[in-house]
Amino acid sequence: MLGASATLITKFGPPAIFEVFAAVTAVAAAIATFFFPSASISEDLVRDAAGFTRPVWFIITGIVLMSLVQAMIFSFLQPMGTDRGLSPVQIQSVLVTLGLVAMTPTLLAAFLQKRLPPMRVAMTGTLLQGAVAVLISCSSGFLPYAVGAVVFPFIMLFTHTFVFGHLARLDLTGRAVAATPAMLVGNMIGPLLGGTLVQTTGYLGLGSAAAAVDLIALCCFIAASQRATSAIQPLPQLNQ
C-alpha cells in the first residue's frame, strides 16, 4: 500500500489514493462474502450471557492503549524524519520497507498461535512497543529511525492477532471480538494527543508518554492473565 500508493499518486494525482482504497476494500468485501466462516453459537448462550468478565475488560483496555500508542507514534513518523534532516528518498524507502514487513506478522502469528502463550505475547508486545516508540522519538540518526519505524507496526499486528484469539476463547458469544472497531478508538485519539505532546514537549515527550501508556497496558495484560486462566473455553466449531 505505502509503496504502490506513493507511485500512483505521483503518476495520476491525489485522487488515485481513493481508487486504491476502493480496490482494496472491494477485494476484502469479496473475501468476506464468499469465504468468511460462520460460528455455530447457541442462541441461548448469547441471550443468557452476562456482561464481560474482568479479564475481558482488562484485555480490551490493553488493546485500546496499544492502539493509542500506535497512532501517537505512527502519525508523526514522516515529520520526525523530515525534522531530523532525512531526505524524502530516505523516508520513502523506510515507508516502502515498512509496508513490505507489515505483511508478515499476521502470517507468522497464525503459524505460532499454538506454540506461544497469547498473554505472554501481549505483555512482551507492550514492552517492545514502548521501547521502539522511545527509539524512534529520541534517535537522531537514520539507522535507529529506520529500524524502529519498520519494526513498530510489526509489533502491534503480531501482538493483537494473539490477543483477539485469546478474547475469542474468553467470550464465546463473540461480542468482545466483534467490538474490535470500538477498541481501536485509540487510533482516533492518538494523532490529537501526539500533536499536543509534540507542540508542548517535543518528540522526547511523545516517546516518554508512549512508553508510559504501554506500561499501563502491560499492567492490564498482567491483571487479565492472572484472572483468565480458569475462564478459557474451547472455541465453537467453525463451519465453512
Image: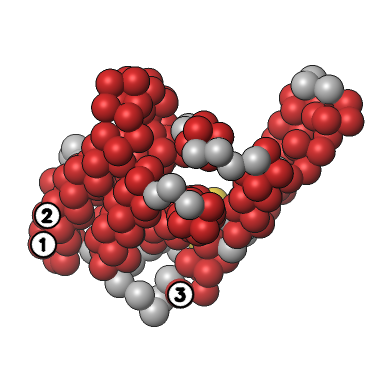
Residue positioned 40% across, 49% down in the render:
139
* Drawn side of residue 214 relative to residue 192, left or right: left
The residue identified by callout 2 is 223
Q: CA distance from mark 1 to mark 2?
A: 5 Å
Q: Tell me whether circle 1 and circle 2 mark residues in contact (CB < 8 Å).
A: yes
Q: Nearer the viewer, residue 193 or 163?
A: 193
Q: CA distance from mark 3 to mark 2?
A: 24 Å
* Drawn side of residue 12 relative to residue 116, left or right: right
Q: Earlier in the sequence, mark 3 or mark 2?
A: 3
How many other residues sit within 10 Å of disc 1, few (<14), some (14-19) or many (≥20)?
few
Kindly state the secondary structure of the residue where label 1 is placed: helix
Kindly state the secondary structure of the residue where label 3 is placed: helix
Decide if residue 88 is in sight here. yes
Q: Amino acid at mark 2?
A: Ala
Q: Nearer the viewer, residue 174 or 161?
A: 161
Looking at the image, residue 65 lies above or below residue 185: below
| x then y, percent, for residue 184 | 39, 35
Kindly state the secondary structure of the residue where label 2 is placed: helix
The residue identified by callout 1 is 226
The type of colouring in the image is secondary structure
Decide if residue 56 is in sight here. no
How many other residues sit within 10 Å of disc 3, few (<14), some (14-19) or many (≥20)?
few
Q: Which quadrant, please, contains the C terminus?
A: bottom right
The residue identified by callout 3 is 112
* Drawn side of residue 64 relative to residue 224, left or right: right
Q: CA distance from mark 3 to mark 1?
A: 22 Å
Residue positioned 19% across, 37% down in the render:
51
Residue positioned 35% across, 75% down in the render:
116
Quadrant in which residue 9 is drawn: top right
| x then y, percent, for residue 152 | 45, 52
Q: Amino acid at mark 1?
A: Gln
